Amino acid sequence: MKGPRAHLPTAVAVVIPAHNEAGELPVALEALREAVHHPELAGLPVVTVVVADACTDDTATIAAQGDATLVELSARNVGVARAAGVACALRLLGSRGEQAWIATTDADSLVPSQWLAHQLRCARQGWHCVVGTVRMRRSAALATRTVARHHAHYFAGRPAPPRPWGHPHVHGANLGVGSEPYRAAGGFPALAHGEDRALVATLEERHYRILRTDECPVHTSPRLDSRAPNGFGAFLRHLVVEDGQPKGPCARTEAPGAEPHTDAPQREDPTRLG
């Protein structure tokens, strides 16, 4: 692999932005707790930061009562929130933050127990950034037709196993990057949406080593009331309207057990950079 040299991580910083996530945050933190206590992280300092952004519910209280450090702000901007969380985590890590691994997820998402271990293995193999995939949680309750359409959209171009999938998606819910390349790229920009794609695009422009992998997906909520204006919920609402379904809960049916993937697309090209 060509490009700047990668450093072995000396610590881990986990950042979760949250806007009125009192209902989802407890289970998200519980899932993350299992990932933090994975045997492969033994002896490695780990800092978790929850950024409560313009919250009017109990999000901040829940975060403060858990194992996370709380940052409160009123930007109502996910790019600002992620950047503030990273800055806080690296500050807490002190000198170890100079070569830390930064992992980000979302407050409505459940990371698998091997999530951080997987990212660290990739970092130790020389990758500067790991861009993962997501799946809708098994409890999803969308009409079967809508789920199938999204499933086909997300998997478009995927090769048959066992060939790896260098997918085109970027999710803040499943993203990891070394602190050195993160700083060199200017960190997360102050964008209300697409801050994750913008960061990865800058890393690509600077020729950092980026691994796009479907090996360790994160499970995310299929809710229609998305926090980000052009996020996954907005895309689902668009599909629901196209399918002629009412947007209320009465129109929903249990999703099939195939656990189709999800995405947080924009209108021009819902899943691709640029």
Image: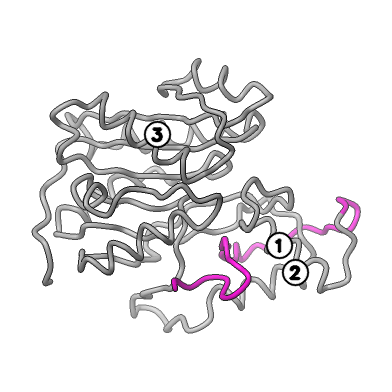
Q: Quadrant of the C terminus?
A: bottom left
**Disc 2 designates what residue?**
239
**Mark 2–mark 1 contact, CB under 8 Å?**
yes
**Viewer-nearest of labels 1 and 3?**
3
- Secondary structure under the numbered disc 2 in the rendered image: helix
- For disc 1, the neighbor class at 10 Å (few under 14, some 14 to 19, many from 20) is many
**Viewer-nearest of labels 3 and 2?**
3
Q: Amino acid at mark 1?
A: Leu
Q: Is residue 69 above or below residue 18?
A: above
Q: Is residue 232 above or below residue 97?
A: below
> Which region shows up in magenta?
248-274
Residue at 15 percent of width and 59 percent of height: 125
Q: Position of residue 30 (x, y in %)?
A: 49, 31
Residue at 38 percent of width and 48 percent of height: 188
**Disc 1 designates what residue?**
236
Q: Is residue 102 above or below residue 255?
A: above
- Residue 85 is marked as 3
Query: Horizontal placement of 139 versus 219: left or right?
Result: right
Q: CA distance from mark 1 to mark 3?
A: 28 Å
Colour scheme of this structure image? one colour
Q: Position of residue 243 (x, y in %)?
A: 83, 73
Q: Position of residue 40 (x, y in %)?
A: 22, 40
Q: CA distance from mark 2 to mark 1?
A: 5 Å
Q: Amino acid at mark 2?
A: Leu
Residue at 53 percent of width and 76 percent of height: 155
Instruction: Look at the magenta stretch and give its main secondary structure.
Output: loop
Q: CA distance from mark 3 to mark 2?
A: 32 Å
**Mark 3–mark 2 contact, CB under 8 Å?**
no
**Rendering quarter of residue 102:** top left
Nearer the observer, 54 or 227: 54
